[in-house]
Image: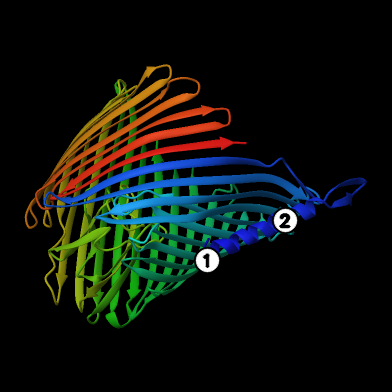
C-alpha cells in the first residue's frame, strides 16, 4: 500500500475511533440524558465492477490493438445524526474503501496495476437555527473512466469548503470558501499524466434594504485556477467586485433606477483589468409606452493596451393592441485607446414584433434594422477584444467579429472563462480575406472538450490603423405562420451592408444576404423539418439544405421508443470552396420487462463527407440490462463504437457488469 493511501487510512481510522469514544459519552441536555453523539443506523453498500475493453486503431497497413480488463471492489458506509443536540450540530457522513485492478495490453506491451480507492463525504452544520449557522463539507471521490486505447483513466477529486451566513440585523452577509483539486491520470505505467486542475475560491456577499423599494447588494469573488494537461498549462488569479443598487420610485412604483459598479482583476497566464460603471433608468409613462436610458463607463487594460469607453443609450418600447411591439434605441460611444488613438461609435436599432391570431392559427412576424458607424483616428497599434461570445453549431465554423486579428493571441474558453480549450485538439484556425474563422470539433481527446450548442468566449488582439471608418447596416426579417394542424411555414431574410476604409490596409467588407425557407410539422410524437438557405456573401457564399425527422411512440404500456434522422448539405463557394454532406441517424428504446427487470438501448450513426477533410463515419451502440430487487441492483451492458476518419479507423468494444448490494 502506498504511503499516501496508508496515511489516509490511518486518518480515517482515527476519525472512526474518535467517533466511537465520543459516542460512548453521555451528556445532560435540559432534563434529559442522551449520548453526546447520536446517529441513525449505519447503512452501507458493497459494489463489484467488472469491465472488459478491446480497442483497435490505425490504417489498414499500420494497425494497433489494445485490451484492458478492470475489476473494482468498493465498500461504502454512511450515516447521519447530531452532536449534543440537533440545534447544536447536524452531520451527514459517508466513507468508502475499494481496490481497483487492471491488466492492460497495447502493442505487445503489458502492464498490471492495482490501486487503492478511498472516498469520503462529510457535511456538517453548526448552530443551524441561529442567525450565524456555519456549514462545511469535506469530500473525496475516486473512480475509473474507461478510455479507448489508453486503458482506464483514474480520476481523483478533493473538495472542501465552508459557508457562514450572518443573518443578524439589516445587513445580512455570507462568507464562502471552497477548494477543489482534480487529478486525472492513467491507471498504469504505459501512459503519462492526462489532466490536472486546482481551484481555490473565496466569496463574500452583502445585501441591505434601505426600504421596501431600495435594495443594495455587494459581491466579491476571488478565484485561483491552475490547469495543466499534456498540451498546455495555465494559471489564472481572478478577483471580481460588484456593487449594485435598485430603486423603484414614482406614485405607481413603475419607474426604476439601477446602478452597477464592477471590477475584474486577472493575473497569471493572461493579465486583464476591467472597471465598469453603469446607470440604467426605466420610465413607464403608460401601460403601453416606456423609455429607458443608460450611461456606461468601461476602462480596460491588457498588457500594453488600454481602452476607456463612455457610452450613452436612449431607447423606448411601445405596445399596440397587444399585437405589435415596437422597440428602438440610439447610442453613442467614445473610446480613448491610449497610444492607439480614439474610436467614435454611433448607431441605432429599430425593431417590430407582430403576433396575430387568424382563422388558420397564428401569424408571427418581426423586423429589425441596426446601423453602426465607427471612426478611428490615431497611430498604428494593437486593440484587444475580451469575451466575444459565439454559439457553436456543429459542424459550422465560427467567424470572429474583427478584422486584422493576430491569430497567435486567440484564447478560447467556455462561458465561465476558466476552462481553456486547446488549439489543434479542440479547434483549428483559418483566415480568409482578413477574416478569421474557428473550426471547433467535438472529438477532442484532451479535456475540457467542446460540445455542440455550447457558448464559447474568445479573446484576441487585432491590429489598428491610423485612420479607419466602418459603416454597417444590418436588417433581419422573419415571418412564420403556425397552422392549427401542427404545420408551420416560415421565411427569414438577413442582410448586411458594410463599407470599410483604412489608410494602411485594404479590408474586404463583410456583406451578405441570406434567404431561408422552411416548413415544420409537429403532431403528437412526430416532428418533421425541411429548410433551405442561400447566402450571397463577399466573404464565403454558401448554400445549406437540411431535412430532419423525429418520432417518439409507445410500443406498449411499459415500452417507449424514439427514432431520429437528419441530413444536411453545405456548399461553400470561393475563395474557400468546400462541400459537406452530413447524415445522422439515431434511435433509443426503454422497456420494463417486469417489475424487476428493465432493458434500454441507444444507437447513433454519423456519415460525414467533407471535400476538404475527407470522409468520417461514426457508429455508437449501447445496450443495458438492469435488475433491481429490494436491496440488490445488477447492471450489465455492451457499448460498441467505430470511427473511420480519413484513412484511420478507431474501433472499441466495452463490456461491463456492476453488482451493488445495499445493507
Q: For the residues labelled 1 and 2, say whether their Cβ atoms are less than 8 Å apart.
A: no
Mark 2 residue element: helix
Q: Residue at x 23, y 75 (%)?
A: 464
Q: Is residue 284 visible?
A: yes
Mark drawn on residue 200:
1
Q: Which residue is labeled 2 in the image?
A: 17
Residue 558, x across and y down, in percent:
43, 19
Q: Indicate whether 33 appears above or below 166.
A: above
Query: Which quarter of the rendered picture does the C terminus lie within?
Result: top right
Residue 40, x across and y down, in percent:
72, 41
Q: Which of marks 1 and 2 is nearer the N terminus?
A: 2
Given residues 17 and 345, the one toward you in this image is 17
Q: Quadrant of residue 381?
A: bottom left
Is residue 446 rendered to the left or right of residue 619?
right
Residue 361, x across and y down, in percent:
32, 24
Is residue 570 rendered to the left or right of residue 120?
left
Is residue 419 rendered to the left or right of residue 207?
left
Q: Is residue 418 visible?
A: no
Given residues 457 and 463, the one toward you in this image is 457
Given residues 182 and 633, the one toward you in this image is 633
Q: In which quarter of the image is residue 337?
A: bottom left
Residue 97, x across and y down, in percent:
56, 51
How crowded pointer 2 is (Cα within 10 Å; few <14, some 14-19, many 20+) is rated as few
- Cα distance, mark 1 to mark 2? 31 Å
Q: Indicate whether 165 appears above or below 527.
A: below
Amino acid at each position: 500500500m502506498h504511503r499516501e493511501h496508508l496515511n489516509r487510512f490511518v486518518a480515517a481510522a482515527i476519525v472512526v475511533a474518535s467517533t466511537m469514544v465520543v459516542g460512548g459519552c453521555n451528556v445532560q441536555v435540559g432534563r434529559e440524558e442522551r449520548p453526546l453523539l447520536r446517529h441513525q443506523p449505519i447503512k452501507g453498500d458493497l459494489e463489484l465492477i467488472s469491465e472488459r475493453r478491446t480497442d483497435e486503431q490505425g490504417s489498414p497497413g499500420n494497425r494497433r490493438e489494445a485490451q484492458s480488463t478492470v475489476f473494482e471492489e468498493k465498500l461504502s458506509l454512511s450515516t447521519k445524526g447530531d452532536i449534543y443536540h440537533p440545534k447544536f450540530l447536524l452531520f451527514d457522513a459517508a466513507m468508502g474503501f475499494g481496490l481497483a485492478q487492471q491488466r492492460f495490453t497495447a502493442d505487445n506491451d503489458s502492464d498490471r496495476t492495482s490501486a487503492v480507492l478511498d472516498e469520503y463525504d462529510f457535511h456538517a452544520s453548526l448552530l443551524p437555527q441561529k442567525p450565524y449557522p456555519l456549514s462545511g463539507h469535506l469530500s473525496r471521490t475516486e473512480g475509473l473512466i474507461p478510455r479507448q486505447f489508453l486503458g482506464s483513466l483514474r480520476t481523483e477529486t478533493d473538495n472542501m469548503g465552508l459557508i457562514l451566513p450572518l443573518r443578524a440585523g439589516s445587513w445580512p452577509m455570507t462568507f464562502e470558501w471552497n477548494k477543489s483539486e482534480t487529478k486525472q491520470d492513467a491507471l498504469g505505467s504505459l501512459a503519462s499524466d492526462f489532466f490536472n486542475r486546482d481551484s481555490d475560491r473565496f466569496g463574500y456577499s452583502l445585501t441591505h434594504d434601505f426600504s421596501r423599494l431600495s435594495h443594495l447588494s455587494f459581491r466579491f469573488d476571488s478565484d485561483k485556477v491552475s490547469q495543466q494537461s499534456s498540451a498546455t498549462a495555465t494559471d489564472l488569479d481572478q478577483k471580481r467586485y460588484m456593487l449594485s443598487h435598485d430603486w423603484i420610485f414614482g406614485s405607481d412604483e413603475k419607474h426604476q433606477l439601477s446602478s452597477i459598479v464592477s471590477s475584474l482583476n486577472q493575473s497569471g497566464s493572461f493579465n486583464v483589468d476591467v472597471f465598469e460603471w453603469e446607470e440604467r433608468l426605466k420610465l413607464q409613462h403608460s401601460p403601453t409606452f416606456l423609455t429607458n436610458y443608460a450611461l456606461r463607463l468601461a476602462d480596460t487594460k491588457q498588457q500594453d493596451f488600454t481602452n476607456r469607453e463612455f457610452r450613452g443609450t436612449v431607447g423606448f418600447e411601445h405596445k399596440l393592441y397587444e399585437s405589435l411591439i415596437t422597440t428602438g434605441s440610439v447610442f453613442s460611444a467614445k473610446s480613448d485607446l491610449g497610444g492607439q488613438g480614439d474610436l467614435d461609435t454611433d448607431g441605432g436599432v429599430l425593431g417590430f414584433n407582430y403576433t396575430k391570431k387568424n382563422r388558420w392559427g397564428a401569424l408571427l412576424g418581426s423586423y429589425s434594422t441596426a446601423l453602426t458607424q465607427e471612426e478611428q483616428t490615431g497611430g498604428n497599434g494593437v486593440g484587444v477584444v475580451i469575451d466575444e461570445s459565439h454559439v457553436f453549431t456543429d459542424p459550422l465554423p465560427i467567424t470572429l467579429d474583427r478584422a486584422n486579428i493576430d491569430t497567435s493571441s486567440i484564447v478560447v474558453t467556455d462561458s465561465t472563462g476558466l476552462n481553456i480549450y486547446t488549439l489543434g485538439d479542440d479547434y483549428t484556425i483559418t483566415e480568409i480575406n482578413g477574416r478569421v474563422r474557428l473550426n471547433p470539433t467535438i472529438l477532442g481527446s484532451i479535456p475540457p472538450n467542446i460540445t455542440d450548442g455550447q457558448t464559447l468566449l474568445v479573446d484576441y488582439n487585432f491590429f489598428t490603423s491610423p485612420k479607419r471608418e466602418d459603416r454597417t447596416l444590418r436588417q433581419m426579417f422573419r415571418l412564420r405562420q403556425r397552422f392549427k394542424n401542427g404545420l408551420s411555414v416560415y421565411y427569414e431574410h438577413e442582410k448586411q451592408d458594410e463599407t470599410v476604409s483604412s489608410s494602411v490596409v485594404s479590408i474586404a467588407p463583410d456583406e451578405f444576404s441570406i434567404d431561408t425557407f422552411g416548413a415544420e410539422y409537429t403532431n403528437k410524437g412526430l416532428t418533421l423539418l425541411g429548410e433551405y438557405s442561400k447566402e450571397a456573401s463577399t466573404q464565403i457564399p454558401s448554400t445549406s439544405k437540411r431535412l430532419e425527422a423525429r418520432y417518439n411512440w409507445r410500443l406498449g404500456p411499459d415500452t417507449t421508443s424514439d427514432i431520429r434522422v437528419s441530413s444536411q448539405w453545405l456548399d461553400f463557394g470561393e475563395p474557400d470552396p468546400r462541400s459537406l454532406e452530413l447524415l445522422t441517424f439515431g434511435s433509443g428504446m426503454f422497456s420494463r420487462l417486469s417489475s424487476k427487470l428493465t432493458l434500454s438501448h441507444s444507437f447513433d450513426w454519423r456519415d460525414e463527407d467533407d471535400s476538404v477533410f475527407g470522409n468520417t463515419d461514426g457508429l455508437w451502440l449501447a445496450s443495458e440490462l438492469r435488475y433491481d430487487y429490494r436491496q440488490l441492483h445488477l447492471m450489465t451492458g455492451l457499448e460498441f463504437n467505430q470511427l473511420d476518419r480519413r484513412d484511420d479507423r478507431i474501433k472499441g468494444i466495452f463490456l461491463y457488469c456492476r453488482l451493488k448490494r445495499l445493507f
